Image (cartoon, helix red, strand yellow):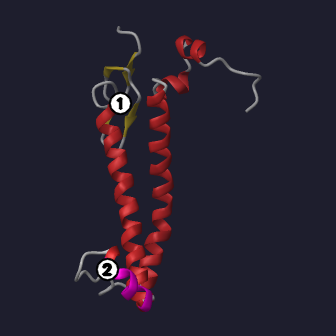
């Protein structure tokens, strides 16, 4: 067994530098695909932020038409009108529910970035093997 490789119970195989088993991609995240998984998370976060940009354009365009006319030239491509067919309650409901996903995916991106910066995996943070304890000794037990 290679150092830092672990057996995944879900996949039934050993993974080099196992980070975690991801149910979203139904695969293990490890040395071979951690970069791709991080790009997936960043793309997902970008899509969620793009949704909020589109919702903001809708609010400016339909709910506050005076501001929409002034902002319209630089905020969206010419001729694009985002308000047709949608009701403000539906957009506000979607924005409210999307906040949960935005927080979750944002936290995943932040956590994955921090772990990649210090070269540890999620599995190592949870199990705290000896090499991780030597690198990050516990302080006084308080935060």
Q: Could you say where residue 87 lies in the image, as x and y percent from the top left?
A: 39, 86
Magenta segment range? 66-73
Q: Residue at x 72, y 21 (%)?
A: 139
Q: At 75% from the left edge and 25% from the top edge, which residue is drawn?
A: 141
Check the image and name the residue furthest to the bottom.
Answer: 66
Q: Residue furthest left?
A: 79
Residue 73, which numbered label? 2
Q: Which image quadrant is residue 19 in?
A: top left
Rounded to the nearest whole Å, what is the CA distance between mark 2 and mark 1? Answer: 52 Å
For the point 49% across and 51% down, the residue is 104
Which residue in the protein does label 1 denote? 10
Q: Are marks 2 and 1 in contact (CB under 8 Å)?
A: no
Q: Nearer the viewer, residue 138 or 90?
A: 138
- Residue 73 picture location, percent across and down: 31, 80
Residue at 38% x, 77% y: name it.
57
In percent of width and height, residue 140 lies at 77, 22
Measured along the vertical axis of the image, is residue 114 above or below residue 52? above
- The answer to whether one can see residue 114 in this image is yes
From the image, which quarter does the C terminus lie in? top right
Q: Earlier in the sequence, mark 2 or mark 1?
A: 1
Say if the magenta span includes residue 9: no
Secondary structure at numbered mark 2: helix
The main secondary structure of the magenta stretch is helix
Give above or below for 73 relative to 25.
below
Give the side of residue 13 with respect to residue 138, left or right.
left
Quarter assignment of residue 132:
top right
Crowding at label 1, few (<14), some or many (≥20) Cα neighbours within 10 Å? few
For the residue carrying disc 2, how many other residues have a C-alpha within 10 Å: few (<14), some (14-19), or many (20+)? few
Foreground pick, 55 / 17: 55
- Place of residue 116 in the rendered image (x, y in percent of width and height, measured from the top left): 44, 30
């Amino acid at each position: 067994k290679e150092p830092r490789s672990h057996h995944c119970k879900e996949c039934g195989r050993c993974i080099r530098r196992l980070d975690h088993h991801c149910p979203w991609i139904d695969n293990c995240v490890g040395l071979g695909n951690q970069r791709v998984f991080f790009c997936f998370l960043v793309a997902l976060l970008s899509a969620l932020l793009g949704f909020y940009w589109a919702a903001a354009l809708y609010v400016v365009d339909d709910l506050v038409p005076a501001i929409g006319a002034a902002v319209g030239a630089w905020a969206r491509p010419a001729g694009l009108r985002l308000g047709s067919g949608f009701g403000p309650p539906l957009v506000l409901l979607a924005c409210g529910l999307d906040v949960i996903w935005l927080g979750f995916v944002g936290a995943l991106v932040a956590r994955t970035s921090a772990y990649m910066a210090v070269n540890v995996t999620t599995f190592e943070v949870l199990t705290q093997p000896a090499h991780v304890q030597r690198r990050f000794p516990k302080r006084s037990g308080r935060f």
